[in-house]
Image (tube, rainbow, N blue to C red):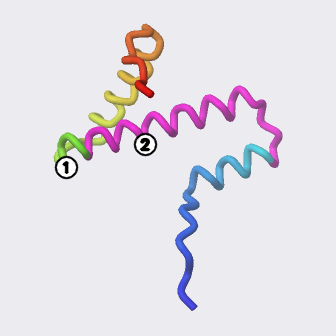
Amino acid sequence: MGKTNDMTDDFDKRLEAYAKKRVPNDEVDASITVYERVKTARAILQSLLPGAFSDASVVAVAVEIGRVKQSRQAVAARE
């Protein structure tokens, strides 16, 4: 039988280690926020510039996501 891709990555392993070490929730939440912003930034760049972007561009877009959120300039989601 083939191996099932459960989508577990190194970050999931890090979260398990956090749980074992009883890392404070605010630290875990911050880590998850950064992880999700970087994944979102990569997805944005992949959709706009398929294969034509650097790791530095991913970081720059992730930082911009945080800046826009902090400044409350984000476009409101439509229902």
What residue is rendered at 62% in x and 53% in y?
12
Q: Is residue 7 above or below residue 57?
A: below
Name the magenta segment's main secondary structure. helix
Disc marking residue 60: none
Disc 2: which residue: 39
Residue 76 is left or right of residue 48, and the answer is: right
What residue is rendered at 81% in x and 48% in y?
20
Q: Position of residue 32 (x, y in %)?
A: 59, 37
Look at label 2 and name its amino acid.
Answer: Lys
Q: Position of residue 49 (x, y in %)?
A: 18, 43
Look at label 1 and name its amino acid.
Answer: Pro
Q: Quadrant of the N terminus?
A: bottom right
Report the Cα–Cα distance between label 1 and label 2.
15 Å
Q: Quadrant of residue 58?
A: top left
Magenta segment = 20-46
Disc marking residue 50: 1
